[in-house]
Structure formats: C-alpha cells, structure tokens
Amino acid sequence: MKVTDAKFMQGFIRMADDGFQQGWHERNGGNLSYRMTEEEVESIRGELKKDTAWIPIGTEVPDLRGEYFTVTGSGKYMRNVILDPEANLAVIEIDETGKNYRICWGLRDGGRPTSELPSHLMNHEVKKKATGGKYRVIYHAHPANTIALTFVLPLTDEAFTRELWEMATECPVVFPSGIGVVPWMVPGGREIAVATSKLMEQYDVAIWAHHGMFCAGEDFDLTFGLMHTVEKSAEILVKVLSMGSGKRQTIQPDDFRRLAKDFHVTLPEKFLYEK
C-alpha cells in the first residue's frame, strides 16, 4: 500500500489541515506526531527505507525503542501537508537504544522532523506508559485565545483549569484531569520537553506560556477535539474579560460536583474554587 493511501495517514493529513483551517498554524508554526500500530507499519512496509542514517534525537526514550512515528517536518507549513504529504511529513523509526531515529519515508526534498521532536517523543513515552499504550497522538499548535490568556491569568494549573472549566459546561467532562501550565521556555530543547512530560503524567493538555498548546490523545479526533474545546473555552473567556465588568454569575463548586456525578468523571477539588 502507498503510504499516502493508508487510513492513518489520511487521518493525519486531515488533522493537519483542520488545524490550519482553524488559524492555529501561521507560517511553519505547530507540529503533529502519531505513534503507529504494528499493523499500520506492516501495511506500508514495502515503501519504508532501511538504509538511511541514524540521527540523535537529543534525548532518550527507551520505552519507544523500535516504534515508528509519523511526524511533521521542521520548517514545513501545515497548510502544505494536504497538497504534498511526502514533501512535508516523515515516517521515522526509533532505534533499539531509544537515542536515535532514522527517516524511513517522506521529506522527499530534504529536511528533518519537527525541531520539537524531543518534546513529542518524551511525551509519547509518558502517555504510552500512563495509558497502557492507548494514547498515540501528540499535537502542538498556536491557538490565539489560549496564548492571549497567558498574558493575563496567573500561570498556574489551578487558575487556567478553573477559568476554562467555567466557560462551557462540557469542559470539565472533556478534560476532567485539568490543564497544566509551563512557564515560558525556549522551544525545541530538552528543558521544555522535560517540563511538559512531567505535566503529561497527570494532564492531557499543557499550555506553553506565550507560545501555544500541547495536547495528547488516543486518536486524531479526540486529540483535535480536546484542543478545539480548550481554545473555544479560551475564546469565551477572552470575550468575558473584554466586557470589563466582571462576571455576574458563574458555575459554583457544588455545580461542578453535581456535573461530575452525573457524567461519571472525577474532578480534583483543587480546581473547584476561584484562583
């Protein structure tokens, strides 16, 4: 099977285009990665190269040894993924040490996977362990309303979770574990990868201050839907704050508790009070 005809690749391409259509990927901003199943790898095995050079990841991910990933390319534009997937995406393999990768398909005209590959792989490793292998997608984008809030809200998990839970009743159901916040750091390096992976041990969403959002999920729909929900909640909050008179009413702690009971989710008490 051609790589571009595979169902997982079609889902990957669609998600990249959906994010661009939302306005989350200016220029070459944002990146996406997917941990492939054994069956998906076998379905395209004939198209995968085995003679390319091993390249250091920049970190160690021993629990991902031998795994294959589809990733966006460094410096590539999300808007071009749907037009020419083979020029803008790559299928990579992790070696048996978890320290190196090689490009097995894609990036036809040259280049490397996303510069934030260390963050993606470290967080894939965390979520694979935390979910028993269920989570396969890591997504980073630059949604404007979420970024705007990092300039006015306290950069704490409690403040962002409580405020965004309030803005739409579905939010505590969609991300019941809450939201983590990473203070501003230089993107692409080990420091931000480590900070994000610590948050991903308990959350599915991490907000990078003055930069963007990082989400993890089981599949493309759930992961895209998670970011979409958080950003829509952020948009509502930006509008509420712009009205300038404060909130007349809001969802109270006991309301959240009743919601949790009816929807069979656990909401940490530390997020139920105004911060």
Image (cartoon, rainbow, N blue to C red):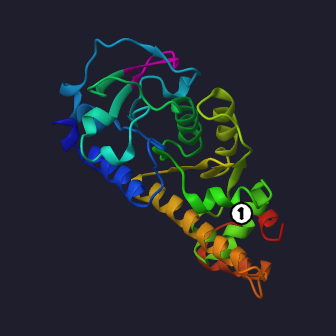
The residue that appears at 57% across and 38% down in the rendered structure is 123
Few, some or many residues within 10 Å of mark 1 (<14, 14–19, 20+)? many
Residue identified by numbered label 1: 161
Q: Write down the quadrant of residue 240 in the picture.
A: bottom right
| Residue lying furthest left | 1
44 sits to left or right of 203: left
Residue 262 seen in this snapshot: yes
Residue 260 seen in this snapshot: no
Q: Nearer the viewer, residue 48 or 76?
A: 76
For label 1, the SS is helix
The residue that appears at 28% across and 44% down in the rendered structure is 9
Q: Does the magenta-highlighted stretch encompass residue 99? A: yes
- Is residue 117 depicted above or below 270 in this figure? above
The residue that appears at 58% across and 21% down in the rendered structure is 60
User: Considering the image in quadrants, where does the N terminus appear?
Assistant: top left
| Residue lying furthest bottom | 248
How far across and down, in percent of the image, does residue 120 sit? 53, 36
The residue that appears at 54% across and 27% down in the rendered structure is 63
Q: Nearer the viewer, residue 211 or 220?
A: 211
- Is residue 85 depicted above or below 7 in this figure? above
- Is residue 102 depicted above or below 79 in this figure? above
Amino acid at circle 1:
Thr
Q: Write down the quadrant of residue 152 in the picture.
A: bottom right
Q: Does the magenta-highlighted stretch encompass residue 46? A: no
* Magenta-colored span: 93-102
How far across and down, in percent of the image, does residue 181 sit? 71, 50
